[in-house]
Amino acid sequence: MARKPKFQKPAGMHDILPGEQKYFQKIYNVCENISNFYGFKRIDTPILEETELFSKGTGLTTDIVQKQMYNLKTKGGDYLTLRPEFTPGVIRAYIEHGMKNLSQPVKLYSMGPVFRYEKAQAGRYRQFHQFNLEVIGEGSPMIDTQIIQIFYNILTELKLKNPIIEINSIGDSQCRPYYKKLLVNYFKSRESALCVDCRRRLRENPLRILDCKEEKCQRIISQAPQIIDHLCEECHHHFKSVLEFLDEIELPYHLNPYLVRGLDYYTKTAFEIFSELPQKTEEKEFLAKNALVGGGRYDNLVKLLGGDDIKAAGAAMGVERVIEAIKIKGIKFPKSPNPSVFLAQLGNLAKRKTLKLLDEFRKAKIQVAESFGKDSLKAQLKLADKIGARYTLILGQKEALEGTIIIRDMKFGKQDTLKLEKAVKEVKKRLKK
Ligand code: AMP
């Protein structure tokens, strides 16, 4: 049995090996292209931020702040946290750089790693990647719909057909407190039947009871008062408009009265997007449980973090989750073509000349493969064959001394000798044919 290596990646974290990079590249490409079309600009904020930014922004009662943050104290005595999500950092940057003076709304996208100390399991990592959108400075329901539309488009462009949109409104500071009271009253009289976590939530964040997955809680939740019946006029109107806009662009959605999201700052719209479910049960369960995208509106966050009273909305997509869905569905992305030229060399002098020649090919934008590690011509030709090179250039001892090179047509096995300085031009000509 192979011995365990002394060092391994930390639990819940993963290496993105060369073979996996194509998924990340493809996803980021699609995300960036679509976001650029809709007028979003990229912003990169530090991976570390002040701990208080998250405890205040993400919210003290959230699982993220209570259990999942990677905190550290610097030598200078600062308390910093590895970002568990993008939004607080982006809002901090918006305030810090006076972006309220730009034409509003400011539309920003970010991508990269986020960190949450969660129980590591399938679909749940401790370091994972998100693609994140924020629209700051606009309260119109059209923005909420547009964000949903953008992520819907991203997923369908990635060939994840018919994504499932789940949507709810969780009200605002006008109507939520009253609804919370109703909920607390309802659950209090049934407290002994709730799970331990929900009993804690009842005191700290009763709304979160609604998305508890425990069977015994679900039975009680299904009879609980629903916020939709208790929205204030403004929230009701806003939600109605979001749904009308979704109807207008013909995006199907499910109203989900139990969708409350894990973060404190949401107001009004909250939504999640899931992959269309396949037939097989095991995979179905995985996709049904793990949302690909989550987001909504957060009209109080800018103010909460020290800015003006500015409305905003946003959402984030989990890149690893999207990759898992792509794999489950057997979606294939076209592979980038192998180089059509292989450069073989024999002996030291040839090796030295090869470096220069390779650089000339790079300047001519012709992709060339080589294998400096292999010395025998046979091994090199075998490799050229394997990658499907159309031409192999052979630089032996004799050619290196004479300043020539052999060009071998791999399809017809025919070869010619030409002057070394003509090599790039000749290959270019032949490839064009
Ligand atoms: P959130 O920031 O919690 O709203 O999550 C947004 C999206 O990030 C989710 O819909 C998932 O796709 C992804 N996500 C959240 N937590 C994890 C995790 N621990 N591992 C992998 N992906 C995650």
Image: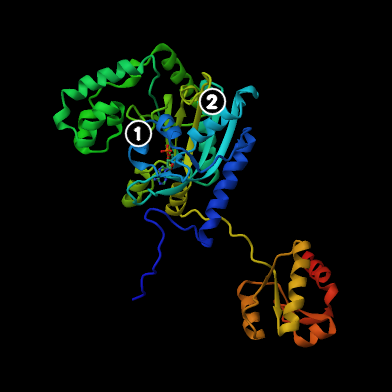
- Point out the image quarter for the C terminus: bottom right
Q: Is residue 50 at all visible to an observer of this figure?
A: yes
Q: Nearer the viewer, residue 67 or 135?
A: 67
Q: Position of residue 147 (x, y in %)?
A: 52, 31
Q: Spot the residue most to the top.
A: 233
Q: Which mark is residue 46?
A: none
Residue 392, quarter of picture: bottom right
Lateral position of residue 130 relative to residue 282, left or right: right
Marks 1/2 in contact by CB < 8 Å: the verdict is no
Going 67% across and 67% down the picture, which residue do you hit? 339
Q: Which mark is residue 62?
A: 1
Label 2 neighbourhood size at 10 Å, few (<14), some (14-19), many (20+)? many
Find out if the beta carbon at label 2 lies less than 8 Å from the nearest ligand 1 atom.
Answer: no
Which SS class for mark 1? loop
Q: Nearer the viewer, residue 32 or 255?
A: 32
Q: Nearer the viewer, residue 33 or 84?
A: 84
Q: Quadrant of ligand 1?
A: top left
In the image, is residue 75 above or below residue 230? Answer: below
Q: Position of residue 81 (x, y in %)?
A: 44, 41
Residue type at mark 2? Ile
Q: Earlier in the sequence, mark 1 or mark 2?
A: 1
- Point out the image quarter for the N terminus: bottom left
Q: Nearer the viewer, mark 1 or mark 2?
A: 1
Which SS class for mark 2? helix
Q: Is residue 395 at all visible to an observer of this figure?
A: no
Q: Which mark is residue 143?
A: 2
Q: Spot the residue most to the bottom.
A: 398
Q: Position of residue 323 (x, y in %)?
A: 47, 51
Going 23% across and 32% down the picture, which residue do you hit? 200
Residue type at mark 1? Thr
Lateral position of residue 156 relative to residue 364, left or right: left
